[in-house]
Structures are given as structure tokens and as C-alpha cells.
Image (tube, grey):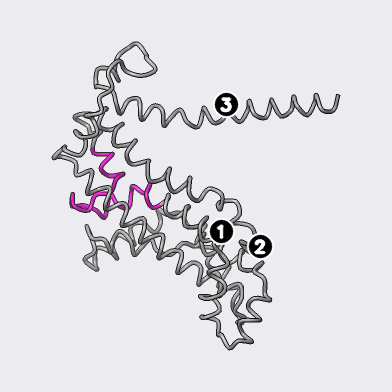
Amino acid sequence: MDSHLRGLARALRLTLLIALAVLFLIPFYLMVRDGLASESDITAPGWTFFPHTLHFSNVRELFDDPSVPMAHALWNSTRIAVLTTAGTLLLASMCGYGLARIPYPHANAVFYGILGTLMIPSAVTFVPSFVLVSSLGWVSSLRGLVVPTLFSAFAAFLFRQYFLGFPGELEDAARVDGLGYWRTYWRIVVPNSRPVFAAVGAIVFIGSWNSFLWPLVIGQDQSAWTVQVALASFATAQTVNLHELFTAAAVSVLPLVVVFVVLQRHIVAGVERSGIDD
């Protein structure tokens, strides 16, 4: 009887997981389906699982469109996301390690001050940030798109909580060998904290790739457009280019899928407070 109930519970659990997976995959299916369809197929009153004719030429048309530099937008988003992720990991991890492991009188005050910034709406700091970037002459430049987003209070919080549970024996052994805080952090802590670096890196990369408002305002020149700005250009007040919009959406989501698939096993492990990856 118990084995029968366990089997039933397992079947129900698998059914629920399959149903949730299907719901999760529906937006990706729609992007691929409409990205390979013609304009008339997308707007047709009847629905077919896939159009009768798959237009793979839509991909070539997307990258050949002179009005939207999609290839350059993908390159811009890649550079911005990689630089933002690398800079955030470096700054936030050093901040978190200092708050967690280096004793000084006002550590808690600094930590609570950083947490307090999380309660400030981004709309409050948006205009002052733009004024500062504009006064520096960084509009439509890589510096203007990357530098203001490098530090993340949330990432510093995650690193600080993780490093509080980092095994102190490893740091004690490093100090016996004559290593200071910097070399201990770089040689001992960083190599043994891969889960949290992977988890935070995935969060920051996805957030940077999906960012729209800041790149829209700063990237005023077409050469500074990111993927999200390029996607928005397919839907204007005058026209809506549906098949290129869906094709571009499908292309732009591929890097995020790759990042998530590669780092998914670290996302949960990375926010745990202790443990060394064997």
C-alpha cells in the first residue's frame, strides 16, 4: 500500500513538473514559431502549430535589415554584459569579503548603509546618474553604459552572507603561510567560492542583457544600441514588423539560455552560506 501511494505521488509530481515545463516553454515556442513565419501567417485568424512554410530566410533578413543593426546590437550587449558581470563580481566580492572577514569598528554601519540603498527606487537615481554621465561626455559610449552599473548592493549582500560561512581554517592556514587579506582573498577564497561567483554572475549577466531603459537613454546613437533597444525599434507608432521582431527575440534569448543551462546547478548552491566545492 505504501509503495502504491509513493508511486502515485511520484506520478503526480512528474505530471505537475511536465505541465509546468510546458507552460515555461510556451513563450519560446511562440518566438520560434512566429520567427519562422510570414507576416500573413502571424496575423492569420486561424491557428496552426507551425506555419505551412518555414521561412528560415527571416534570419538572413533580420541581419540584412539596414534600419536595425542587429549584429552590432548583439555585439554591444555581449560586451556590456561581460564587462558588467566581471566588474560587479570583482567589486561586490571584495566588498562582501571585507564586510564579512576584515574586522573594523564600523563594518555593520557600512553594511546597513549598503542595504539601505536597496530601498531607494531606481527612478530616484536615474536622472542624477544621467546628468553625471552626460557631464562626463559618456553618452553613446561603452563607459556610459557600463561604469554606472558596475556596483550592485544586492550582489555585495550575497557575497557577504556567503563569506560569513566560509571555513575560517583555510584563511588561518593562509595567514600562517604569510598571506595577507588580499592574497588570501585572491588565492584561497576566490578559487573555493565558485558556486556563489557562478550564481551572482548569472544573475548579473541576465539583468545586464535584459536592461532596456538605461541603454535606451544613454545609447542615443545607433552604434550604441543594445539588443533590447534594437528589439523595440521593430515596433513603432507607424509600423510593427512582427516577423523580424519575433526572429530577433528568438536570437536574442539564445545567449541567456546558454548561460542558464551552463550555470543552473550553481544558482541554488551559490546562495548557501557554507560549503566548499569539491
Q: Position of residue 133 (x, y in %)?
A: 28, 64
Judge from the rendering whether residue 139 lies leftward or rightward of residue 106; answer left or right: left
Identify the secondary structure beneath mark 3: helix
Asked if the residue at tag 3 contacts the one at tag 1, i.e. Cβ–Cβ closer than 8 Å, the answer is no
Q: Which quadrant of the figure has residue 9?
A: top right
Identify the amino acid type marked 1.
Pro
Identify the amino acid type marked 3.
Ala
Q: Which residue is mark 1?
A: 195
Magenta stretch, main secondary structure class: helix
Q: Count of labels shown?
A: 3
Q: Residue at x 23, y 39 (%)?
A: 233
- Give the CA distance from mark 2 to mark 3: 34 Å
Local crowd at mark 2 within 10 Å, few (<14), some, or many (≥20)? some
Q: Which quadrant of the figure has residue 232?
A: top left
Viewer-closest of 12 and 99: 12
Q: Which residue is mark 3?
A: 19
Q: Position of residue 147 (x, y in %)?
A: 34, 65
- Give the CA distance from mark 1 to mark 3: 29 Å
Local crowd at mark 1 within 10 Å, few (<14), some, or many (≥20)? many
Q: Earlier in the sequence, mark 2 or mark 3?
A: 3
Q: Residue at x 18, y 49 (%)?
A: 222
Q: Which residue is mark 2?
A: 275
Q: Which quadrant of the figure has residue 27?
A: top left
